[in-house]
Amino acid sequence: MMLAVTQTDLRTNIKQLLDNVAHNDDTIVVTRSNRENVVIISEAEYNSWQETNFLMKNENNRKSLSESLASINRGEGKVLTPEEWEKMNG
């Protein structure tokens, strides 16, 4: 869930708001008058975005991911169990 709060609301309810971010993957937009807004996300969400950015920086990764998505969209994909994946890549 995305929630917009003012700086005052953040200060007043910081523990509850940060707990919601950490435990419920909420996103908080802190609105600030006459300044740029700030977004608060969980560390897990941040790490996920960093990993995605890292993977997308490499042209070969981008091409491979794009081809995989196109294949899935054409109905050519197959869901593997962890055991099947290990067997293929073991």
Image: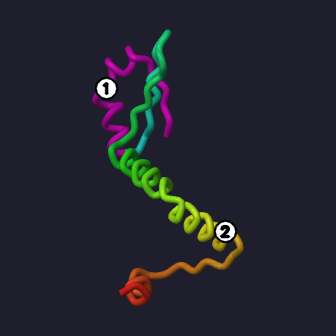
Q: Residue at x 32, y 31 (%)?
A: 16
User: Does the magenta run of residues contain 75?
Assistant: no
The residue that label 1 is drawn on is: 14
Q: Amino acid at mark 1?
A: Ile
Q: Residue at x 58, y 64 (%)?
A: 63
* x, y percent for residue 75: 69, 76
Is 76 situated left or right of 10 in this image?
right
Counting labels gives 2
* Disc 1 to disc 2: CB gap under 8 Å: no
Q: Residue at x 38, y 45 (%)?
A: 46
The residue that label 2 is drawn on is: 70
Dominant secondary-structure state across the stretch colored magenta: helix
Q: Is residue 36 above or below residue 86?
A: above
Q: Amino acid at mark 2?
A: Ala
User: Does the magenta run of residues contain 13?
Assistant: yes
User: Going by the picture, which residue comes out furthest to the top?
Assistant: 34
Circle 1 sits in a helix, a strand or a loop, which is it? helix
User: Going by the picture, which residue comes out furthest to the left?
Assistant: 15
The nearer-to-camera label among 1 and 2 is 2
Q: Is residue 19 above or below residue 71?
A: above
Q: Would you call the spot at circle 2 few (<14 residues within 10 Å), some (14-19), or many (20 or more)?
A: few
Q: Residue at x 37, y 39 (%)?
A: 21
Where residue 40 sits, quadrant-wise, is top left
* x, y percent for residue 88: 43, 88
Magenta-highlighted residues: 1-23
Q: Is residue 79 above or below residue 25?
A: below
